[in-house]
Amino acid sequence: MSEPNTAAQPSQEFEKVLVNSSTEVASFDTHDKSPLQKLQHFLHSSPAAVPLIVLVLSLILFGAILGGKFFSAFSMTLILQQVAIVGIVGAAQTLVVLTAGIDLSVGAIMVLSSVIMGQFTFRYGLPPTLSVLCGFAVGALCGYINGTLVARMKLPPFIVTLGMWQIVLASNFLYSANETIRSQDISANASILQFFGHSIRFGNAVFTYGVIIMVLLVCLLWYVLNHTAWGRYVYAVGDDPEAAKLAGVDVRRMLVTVYTLSGLICALAGWALIGRIGSVSPTAGQFANIESITAVVIGGISLFGGRGSILGMLFGALIVGVFSLGLRLMGTDPQWTYLLIGLLIIIAVAIDQWIRKVAA
């Protein structure tokens, strides 16, 4: 007769104890959480929830005050038109902030790219399509330089992009000689430069191609960040670069790629800017860098990196647009808009700190 395998019995009993104890601990943790802690964990797992709630509440507030004048199809689509440029630049800023960096040069890169597109067409006689590609190349080059200095020379992103902002801004004015290319000239000779200013109508709703490309860009980046290995690496680099490196992520290459892609998106914003204002102006979009950071912060994306959703950035940009239009329709002083947006920024950062402290 064969003897029973008694050696396996202690092992099996030990596994049962582990399973039972882990089940008990899990059930204990679940029941021990207060409603406030559950809210904190929910907000940690759904970073776009806070800006979405604020957006809905602001729509309800201004709708109750202004009625149909605010909730008309024209007003709603006007908000989208106003935030289209900020939304595109904010997408570039989001990628950088998710890696625990910041890019103060996004607005300057956007304007320089638009100037390149216009000047190459009218000063050198290049085909408009080729000029647009040159604008994209300049944007990507600026982003690549930023990424190389940050990733390979280990310079702080704030200092690098602050310096790049000054360099690109000065280059923009020196190269263009502060010359504006008029809308009439562009319409007659290079209408493709104004492509994103064209619109389609659905009743009273007006959607420009700039709005459409912003929405498509945000949706594409949302998918990439949430459903691809590259997106997971972006979050990993922002959350803990040393751990990401140990896990096999090439952190330096990722940072260079992110900043280069940011420059490309800024060039896209430059093209959309021409369509938005109709002309090529070296003085346009001067506050795009601040506006993009505002959209990112109000959108619940952590400035410490590794947490946030690009949908939150879009909601943040829309919140600014709702407040701007709502207060303008109410006839209030424009300074009230800046005051309220400033409060929202501080509140958003405070909420982010609260979430990270408890749910980390």
Image (spheres, rainbow, N blue to C red):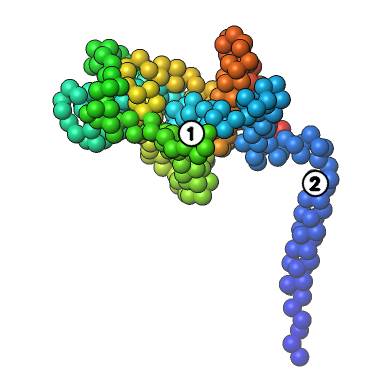
Q: Closer to the camera, 249 or 228?
A: 228
Label 1 crowd (10 A; few <14 / some 14-19 / many >=20): many
Considering every residue shown, the one lying at the far bottom of the view is 1
Q: Residue at x 82, y 37 (%)?
A: 34
Q: Residue at x 80, y 46 (%)?
A: 30
Considering every residue shown, the one lying at the far front of the view is 203
In the visual, does 206 lie left or right of 17?
left
Secondary-structure class at tag 1: strand
Disc 1 from disc 2: Cα separation = 48 Å
Q: Residue at x 71, y 25 (%)?
A: 64
- Mark 1 belongs to which amino acid? Val
Quarter of the figure that contains the C terminus: top right
Relative to 166, say whether 23 is above or below: below
In the visual, does 36 lie left or right of 126?
right
Residue 146 percent coordinates (x, y): 36, 27
Q: Is residue 149 visible?
A: no
Q: Residue at x 79, y 66 (%)?
A: 13
| Residue placed under numbered mark 1 in the picture | 206
User: To which quarter of the image does residue 79 belong?
Assistant: top right
User: To which quarter of the image does residue 31 belong?
Assistant: top right
Residue 194 percent coordinates (x, y): 33, 30
Residue 294 percent coordinates (x, y): 54, 22
Considering every residue shown, the one lying at the far left of the view is 124
Pair 1/2: label in front:
1
Q: Is residue 319 visible?
A: yes
User: To which quarter of the image does residue 269 belong?
Assistant: top left
Secondary-structure class at tag 2: helix
| Residue placed under numbered mark 2 in the picture | 30
In the visual, does 265 lie left or right of 349?
left
Q: Closer to the camera, 160 or 291?
A: 291
- Mark 2 belongs to which amino acid? Thr
Q: Earlier in the sequence, mark 1 or mark 2?
A: 2
